[in-house]
Image: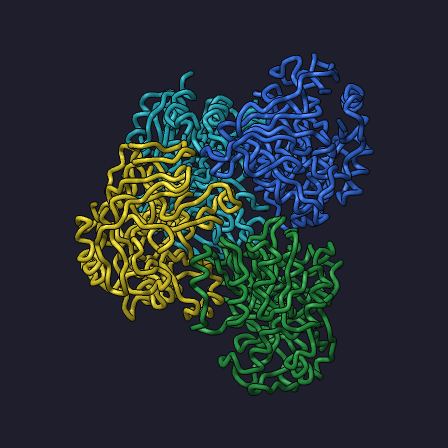
Chain colours: A green, B yellow, C blue, D cyan
Amino acid sequence: MRAVTFQAPGEVRVGTVSDPVLREPTDAIVRVTLSAVCGSDLHIYNGRFPRVPPGAILGHEFLGRVEEVGSDVTRVSPGMRVVASFFSWCGTCAACLAGQMSQCQHLETFGFGQLAGAQAERVRVPRADTTLVPVPDALADEAAVMAGDILSTAFFAAERAGIRPGDTVAVVGAGPVGLLAIQCAALYSPVAILALDRVDERLRLAASFGARPVPADADATAAVRSYTAGKGASAVIEAVGSRESLNLAIALAAPFGTVSAAGVFAERDLPVDMARLFNRDLTLRSGLGNVPAVIGRVMALTVAGRLQPQRIVSHRMPLDEAEEAYRRFDRREALKILLMP
Amino acid sequence: MRAVTFQAPGEVRVGTVSDPVLREPTDAIVRVTLSAVCGSDLHIYNGRFPRVPPGAILGHEFLGRVEEVGSDVTRVSPGMRVVASFFSWCGTCAACLAGQMSQCQHLETFGFGQLAGAQAERVRVPRADTTLVPVPDALADEAAVMAGDILSTAFFAAERAGIRPGDTVAVVGAGPVGLLAIQCAALYSPVAILALDRVDERLRLAASFGARPVPADADATAAVRSYTAGKGASAVIEAVGSRESLNLAIALAAPFGTVSAAGVFAERDLPVDMARLFNRDLTLRSGLGNVPAVIGRVMALTVAGRLQPQRIVSHRMPLDEAEEAYRRFDRREALKILLMP
Amino acid sequence: MRAVTFQAPGEVRVGTVSDPVLREPTDAIVRVTLSAVCGSDLHIYNGRFPRVPPGAILGHEFLGRVEEVGSDVTRVSPGMRVVASFFSWCGTCAACLAGQMSQCQHLETFGFGQLAGAQAERVRVPRADTTLVPVPDALADEAAVMAGDILSTAFFAAERAGIRPGDTVAVVGAGPVGLLAIQCAALYSPVAILALDRVDERLRLAASFGARPVPADADATAAVRSYTAGKGASAVIEAVGSRESLNLAIALAAPFGTVSAAGVFAERDLPVDMARLFNRDLTLRSGLGNVPAVIGRVMALTVAGRLQPQRIVSHRMPLDEAEEAYRRFDRREALKILLMP
Amino acid sequence: MRAVTFQAPGEVRVGTVSDPVLREPTDAIVRVTLSAVCGSDLHIYNGRFPRVPPGAILGHEFLGRVEEVGSDVTRVSPGMRVVASFFSWCGTCAACLAGQMSQCQHLETFGFGQLAGAQAERVRVPRADTTLVPVPDALADEAAVMAGDILSTAFFAAERAGIRPGDTVAVVGAGPVGLLAIQCAALYSPVAILALDRVDERLRLAASFGARPVPADADATAAVRSYTAGKGASAVIEAVGSRESLNLAIALAAPFGTVSAAGVFAERDLPVDMARLFNRDLTLRSGLGNVPAVIGRVMALTVAGRLQPQRIVSHRMPLDEAEEAYRRFDRREALKILLMP
């Protein structure tokens, strides 16, 4: 089958690899319909995740149809349209029973060198009964594909931000995650969502989603303070994953506020403004999205039109053009790319 | 009157200064009975708080009797035994009405160069009706003096750690704050409290408070993981305020756990292990103790014998020996010093 | 001045009474612009609140301008447009400091025989600094008048229902409180709000507010179960205050769900389906609306257009026509009546 | 094998019945070591649960050793010492995945006519992988047997009461559930636990567990108000399950307090003081104990000595004396009886 593999920093390749086969009776094989390119794929592409070996099939955000199931699989069957969380989870360990599936003791992620990824024609899904989720008929492919990672991650970060109706929220970064975080924050009816980014085009998009655009320049903190009568935003969602964005988020938070980071952090010694966390009684939360805990809500809200993830899709490209897709995404010429095997 | 003033890094002086007088009708003058030396006094002593000017009277943790009140003071009267939170607060701003008094819009702290401190014979207390709290008869002076800062701060940090009965808790640092944090964490009935410190004597004290001592050396993380079957502590209280202690606390936290920092942080760019916060879905909280919100509970629990702050008092010294007191505290020869004017 | 007084069950009277005067230095006199007739006024009218004596001036939901203030009033001044919570509160007792102003130890309600009511040209407001809230310029009179009781009560009940995005909510009763509860529940982005009432016209109104109408007949429970795939509504807001409505609300709740009652209950022995509360692990909450804790949010959300209380106003009548207003409201010919002195 | 069966109101019989056999590959057969008589067994005995048919084997609180397992059972194996929750649950339905196992869509209870009970030599346990929990070696049989129902139910009720350190708690009823509720409430460090009962002996027992005894007579409410300076108890645990006890619990609650009912309620129209729930902003919670969610904590706390359920055991009797055991328990001559097959 055709698949996208990581080769070296700055290089991915579309090529032919052997088809996946069932290994365990709890496995399923899914024929991929759509596979998205995610911001964390870019981290791999740029060599920030050195654990991903050359040759690894990429892709962890995908939608497809079940093609084959192992003998112990009971909840999904061939022909079903399904989405997977970006990791496989067991459902029976202590973490899973506590609802913390993103910390499953048997967690395996797709497309990071652990499980083969889904930017491919087919993908093997371990523990299919828990990992695969049937997609409601009313949910379009282009929306559903994002439920398995980016949309659920944004929802999880918004949920952890503790937004109450009437609050003012700030979202730092109006890329794909940030734009979806704006949608998710809006579910809690803040009176305003301030979107910060350096790129005008992204601020325009944020505005089209109902946020108030604020250029992420030297005046950003002053602008947010001015808008909030000096107080700051009671909830801030960080959606970039850099030192600058995190500390900007901290600077924007109101006393006793929460900074909920949706960005990917790989640094073990990132400088953080602890003085401000201390002086303002702040809470900082980061994390992998606990996708299985929220994916049902996320899909129901999308069916109901309250979330519109499809609005961030900028490109649909054949899987065979994945090399070009990565280049464009890396140059920030694309917001969200869907690959079609 | 006699008072302790900051002079220069490494130098405090006991001398004679003019007595405080009522300035506003909402002020009170308190004759100080006991005044503690706090860890943050040591930050001033060591020049870490450059905003404290030479000549400032130190001391923000104190107990005394009301001597005189302004014409608008209605809730306290001369002769009452009182303790103050380490800051004066208004009770009427938006922050106070939301129960976030440590972020009062009119907050003024004692002993940091803003309000004159209480390592003195008398101290002026603005907004006495809110700032001063009557001490129950059943509460001994040596316990009550700590309710205004260190004990309430430890309680607040433990409360924000989200401990549930049956959890395992780690406390990083077994100095005065850490020892009281152990007492406060115990209020939530964890099955174990692991106390980490480098100093044997402090670990012995921690053990006498019911904690399990763990040397804070290179093996500390492995020891805690081993004790918790690989999982880590679901709640960690950081009680030092340094880069090392904070990152040790983060390393000890179980997935979805909380690190609640009780230490004082003055750094605007402290390196933090964000990769772990991200990979483990952690929550990090820091903050000034919201003393007025908890001081009533803290005093009731002390009267009931559930908290025993007096057990950390190592020295009682006359106010006139404050210079020696600071030197000893700085050399870590004293755990908690009470000054008697 | 002209004022509406209770005379006997089924009889109110508009007449001339003496003007209120300042009694305490913390009082204010407010010239009333609008005064609403509330469902609890109907309880008085129908003799269900026997403590309200003949001659008592009615009205506890009002808007006006400050006319005169006592010498200790500092936060409001003559000319300001203000709304009051339906009760006067002190802001300094233990309940108020804990944010539980509806349980203020010095609480006095307007228009129930304790404080003179505001269906009058003027009203005396004790403790004006806490009880009166300035109205933002952008907020119209007809919306603002409801912030002091019915809208904040609906918001408080919705808040206590614990709605999460993606839930299904049921609201029992589509009268004035129920319609506003629908608006408030919508702030949390449930995927559906099922509105139950016996009156077609009210169901049509509920539908115009985005709810799904369900006739409150013998099939209501089955209809809600069917809509929720057998599960029931995870949050139910009761907005009537009767035995039937409360038990219907309990019948509709999903396992581990919450029934939040916004209705007024005066019965000390109302039969409740405890077997269902037990078998389904339910939570039942009732209460006076904690207006002061939410009125700021409620007004901000109304300015932002997220709440539209003015949409329930059905009649505007001169104060002198109050007798007719009560008759119409009692016959359910009016949804929400505003009286104009 | 020998087993206790329900015959008619007031009559149980010990007799010989056929041994259970594996029916599903997910079943296990457990040889019973200890089986407790629970308060809800008394409801059956007294005919309050008409659904339990004559001939049904009783008993839902038990401990034993796995004797045989079906082919799909992977987490327990013959020889293991285990306790079961009082119901069998699936672990894979929506309710279970949300952590609400007591509302499992496939829930089956032991000993109520659905699944054969465990007051017998052997019992069949469906879905053994989830329903059975291995008992730590350090936990004595007599303590462990209560983890599957009464102790976990008391813990769950205490957890839902929302107790904070420094609160005052009231427990209505000092029978077996109430005594364990006192132990569980103590885990949250209230400053006082007031225990109410009509029976002196039970009040003495409550006192020996650290509670303050209060006779549940006409003066009880006044006594609790007096003890709490007029305020009431911020959390009240109801541990009887009657009209009187529930309304007494409601009468004792402080404003904004919670009444958490641990008692069994079978009435569909129990008169409740809704006026007080309304006037005091109260929360009332009832429910089946969500045993699987808490049993791990409960066992760990018992091992740690923080819970001591074995202290309520009053009688150990051979299974063959069960008829006498029920009579004694019904006459309140026994507090907690353990039957030994």
Q: Position of residue B195 (x, y in %)?
A: 29, 57
Does residue C328 appear in this view? yes
Query: Does B121 sit above or below residue A39?
Result: above
Does residue D37 appear in this view? no
Query: Is A271 on the left-hand or right-hand side of B48?
Result: right
In percent of the image, x 75 and y 33: which residue is there? C197
Q: Looking at the image, which is closer to me, D149 or A290?
A: A290
Query: Does A43 sit above or below residue D130?
Result: below
Quadrant the C terminus of chain B occupies: top left
Q: Position of residue D30 (x, y in %)?
A: 42, 47
Q: Looking at the image, which is closer to me, D98 or A337?
A: A337
User: What is the count of numbered marks?
Assistant: 0
Q: Quadrant of residue C270?
A: top right
Q: Position of residue A174 (x, y in %)?
A: 64, 68
Q: Position of residue C137 (x, y in %)?
A: 70, 45
Q: Looking at the image, which is closer to me, B257 or A98?
A: B257
Query: Does D112 sit above or below residue D30?
Result: above
Query: Is C198 on the left-hand or right-hand side of A129?
Result: right
Q: Quadrant of residue A142?
A: bottom right
